[in-house]
Amino acid sequence: MKFIAPLEISSKIMTLIEEATKELVLVSPYVEISNWDKMKKCLQRAIDRGVNITFIARKNATQDLSFLKRNEIKLVLVNDLHAKLYLNENYGIVTSQNIVYYSDINSIDIAYRTTENEEREELIEFIKKYISDLSPKVDTTIEKIESTQIKIPELGTSQFKNLCHKFINTYKSAKFTPTSTYIFSGNLLHFADVMISAKYTIKISKEQPMWDKLIDAISNTHFKFKHKFELDLERGNNKYAYISFIPIKVLHSSILTEDFFHLTNEIIRSRTINELAPVILKYPSEWQ
C-alpha cells in the first residue's frame, strides 16, 4: 500500500474516479457535494463514459443525496455504515474521509492507496460482506433510494385489472391468482413466490440452499427501468426473505407493467440466478 498525504486525499479520490473506465464502487457514509462542483463534474464525466457506478452511503442520515438519485448510479443505503473506501477496476483507496466538501477543506484525515491487485480484491470481498451482513440482526434493509419511510403508490381499480390481464396473457404457462389488492403467482419465478400490485415483491424460502446469494444476485442485477425504484430487502423473517421493487412515483400503469415485465424477464434469463436456483429446488408456495 502507498500512504496518501492528508492534503491530497480528495484529489486522489477524484483521480481514482477519473481513471475509472469500467467500474466505480464508492463507500462514503456521509455525502455532501451540493456545493462541490469539482466532485460533481468528476462523477458526471464518469457517468458520461458509461462507468458502472455503485455508491454506498449511510441509511437514514440527514444529507442531500439528490445528485446521486439517478438511473446511472446504483445508490445503496446501509444501516450503521462507517467505513470509507473507494475503488475503480484497477486500485482502491481506504481513508477516514467522507465525500463531504467540508472534510476536503477542514478535516485532517488519513488514507492509503492499494498497490497490489490482491489488496483491491480484499476490499471488494469486504464490501460484499459488509453490505450483506452489517444491518441489525433482526432485519436487513438495502435500498437504492433514500427513504426513512417507504411510501407505496396505489393503482386505480381499472389500472390494477389491466395489469392483471397483461400478466395473465403474457405469461400463459404461469398460474396467477388475483385478489382485491395484488396478483399472486407461485410459479412465475421457479424459485420464489411473487406478489404484484403497484410494487413487485419476491418471496424466497430460506429452505433454498442459496437463498441469501439469490437475494444478492437479484439486488445487484442492473435493470433498465423507466421508473425510479426503491429496493426494499428483508431477511429477518425466520422462514422467508423478501425483496420488493417499489416505484417512487408511477408514471403510467402501462409503463409500470413494462418495467415489471422487464424485471421478470431479466430474472428468468439470468444465468447466475438459474445456477443458484435450479428448477428442481422450487418449494411449495405459502404466502404469509
Image: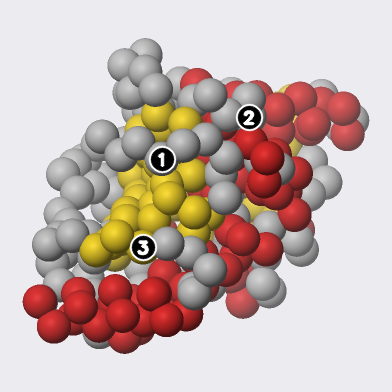
- Give left or right: position of 188 versus 128: left
Amino acid marked by disc 2: Met
- Give left or right: position of 173 versus 76: right
Mark 2 secondary-structure assignment: loop
Mark 3 secondary-structure assignment: strand
The answer for how far apart the CA atoms under marks 2 and 3 are is 26 Å
Question: Which residue is drawn at the image coordinates 15% and 72% (left, top)?
Answer: 155
Q: Where is mark 1, residue-wise?
A: 285
Q: Where is mark 3, residue-wise?
A: 176
Question: What colour scheme has been applied to the protein in the rendered image?
Answer: secondary structure
Question: Which residue is drawn at the image coordinates 87% and 27% (left, top)?
Answer: 118
Q: Residues within 10 Å of mark 1 (few under 14, many from 20)?
A: some
The answer for how far apart the CA atoms under marks 1 and 2 are is 17 Å
Q: Residues within 10 Å of mark 3 (few under 14, many from 20)?
A: some
Q: In front: 5, or 77?
A: 77
Q: Which of the two discs, 2 and 3, labels the residue nearer the N terminus?
A: 3
Say which mark, if any, is on residue 273: none
Tag 2 near tag 3, CB within 8 Å: no
Q: Where is mark 2, residue-wise?
A: 210
Quadrant of the drawing holding the N terminus: top right
Q: Residue lying furthest top in this view?
A: 137
Question: Which residue is drawn at the image coordinates 42% and 81% (left, top)?
Answer: 169
Q: In front: 101, or 63?
A: 63
Q: Which of the two discs, 3 and 1, labels the residue nearer the N terminus?
A: 3
The answer for how far apart the CA atoms under marks 3 and 1 are is 12 Å
Q: Position of residue 8 (x, y in %)?
A: 63, 40
Amino acid marked by disc 1: Ser
Query: How many numbered marks does the figure carry?
Result: 3
Figure quadrant of residue 31: top left
Tag 3 near tag 1, CB within 8 Å: no
